[in-house]
Amino acid sequence: MIGVANGQPVSISGLGCHVPERVLTNEELSTLVDTSDEWIVTRTGIRERRIAAQDEALSDIALPACKDALEQAGVPPAEIDLVLVATVTPDMAFPATAAILADELGMPDAAAYDLSAGCTGFMYAIAQAYGMIAAGLVEKALVVGGDLLSKILDWTDRSTLVLFGDGAGAVVLERVERGGFLGFELGADGGGGAHLWLPGSGSRHFDDPDKFVKMNGREVFKFATRVMVTSAEAVLEACGRSVDEIDLYVQHQANVRIIDHATRKLGIPDEKVVIDVDRYGNTSSGSIPLALADAAADGRLRPGALVLMTGMGAGLTWGSALIEWTHDTNGAPR
Ligand SMILES: CC(C)(COP(=O)(O)OP(=O)(O)OC[C@H]1O[C@@H](n2cnc3c(N)ncnc32)[C@H](O)[C@@H]1OP(=O)(O)O)[C@@H](O)C(=O)NCCC(=O)NCCS
């Protein structure tokens, strides 16, 4: 799907993110499985990640991010009429984590549901919220991207364990006078789904005792290096913008080699690229909002900036959005 924004402009007016306190370093991981800091850094760029406590669920990590985003937007919770949570690790299958958060935040009039599109979830969710606001169905939306993948990893499998971390981000979307979202490109290839999947997680393999992430890393790597480029090119072309116009390039933080590959192929200078995979690992749906908050904190996410976001993940899915940033979100709380 590819679409160019039309009608009343819609933008992001508030941004927040939150990660668990516990830092897990590569050195510590190498005491759990047969790996090394050198292997992990060379192959992925990851140095450490955050891991949720045993009694922490997604809503616990997402709640502070939501509060920060709302405060920054200056939007009282009761004015939110849509809560969307992109995740593959909700508190539970139902009730939706979005409904739990809407209750905790005090949003009695909001529609609230979760959305599953793997690590691309945040891109899908902002596209959907954009569409509902632009169509006039809702006025203000709270969109959360977050995952606690540590809960569904096999802690004896070095091929997946070293890659992922926990975290969440939230954004408030609302109508603006000008600027905001320019277009979206989203896609899915279910044929490649078996390269990154969670057996025993639903009605197909409900009696499968294996509740952990399975991944064919090399196939996912090939897929990622392809779609990160094609999706970005597609949204730029649809919006009539060129690579040279991009001020900030925010990619899904899976592996610094994937990030570097797409950056080089597109010809985007390094200083316009956000990288925090070294500190957080791959936080799935949390990755793009966390990276936005990182860029806000270092002053690169400023009003007027043309921001390209691209993600990819289980499904296999991918997605890009182009936005002309409108609000002063510098120093977004973390
Ligand atoms: C997983 C990934 C880092 C592996 O890197 P790679 O360069 O492709 O490495 P390979 O899979 O070829 O493995 C090379 C060797 O390292 C070994 N290895 C795998 N994980 C290891 C680890 N954590 N520590 C040490 N060695 C490891 C492999 O067993 C293999 O050994 P062998 O050659 O004796 O068989 C890379 O394929 C990748 O990033 N894929 C994309 C994954 C992803 O982003 N998933 C989420 C998408 S949202």
Image (spheres, rainbow, N blue to C red):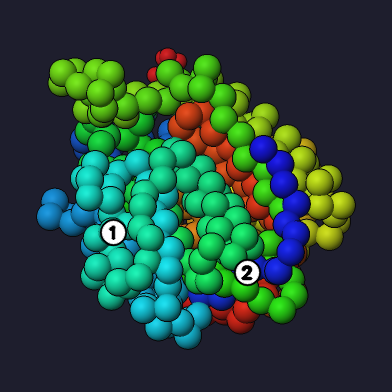
Residue 299, horizontal then vertical, whole percent = 62, 76
Q: In this rendered view, identify the residue nearer to me: 279 or 72.
A: 72
Q: Identify the image quadrant of the N terminus.
A: top right
- Disc 2 marks a residue whose amino acid type is Ser
- Occupied quadrant, residue 222: top right
- Occupied quadrant, residue 185: top right
Up-down relation of residue 169 to residue 277 (above or below) = below
Q: Cα distance, mark 1 to mark 2? A: 23 Å
Q: Residue at x 57, y 44 (%)?
A: 311
Disc 1: residue Cβ within 8 A of ligand 1's nearest atom: no
- Disc 1 marks a residue whose amino acid type is Ala
Left or right relative to 118: residue 303: right
Dot 2: within a 10 Å radius of its alpha carbon, few (fewer than 14), some, or many (20 or more) residues? many
Left or right relative to 12: residue 264: right
Figure quadrant, ligand 1 = top left
Which residue is label 1 attached to? 99
Q: Residue at x 71, y 41 (%)?
A: 2
- Occupied quadrant, residue 303: bottom right
Left or right relative to 42: residue 197: left
Disc 2: residue Cβ within 8 A of ligand 1's nearest atom: no
Q: Which mark is residue 11?
A: 2
Residue 274 seen in the figure: no
Residue 276, horizontal then vertical, whole percent = 51, 56
Dot 1: within a 10 Å radius of its alpha carbon, few (fewer than 14), some, or many (20 or more) residues? many
Q: In this rendered view, identify the residue nearer to me: 29 or 263.
A: 263
Mark 1 residue element:
helix
Residue 133, horizontal then vertical, whole percent = 58, 64
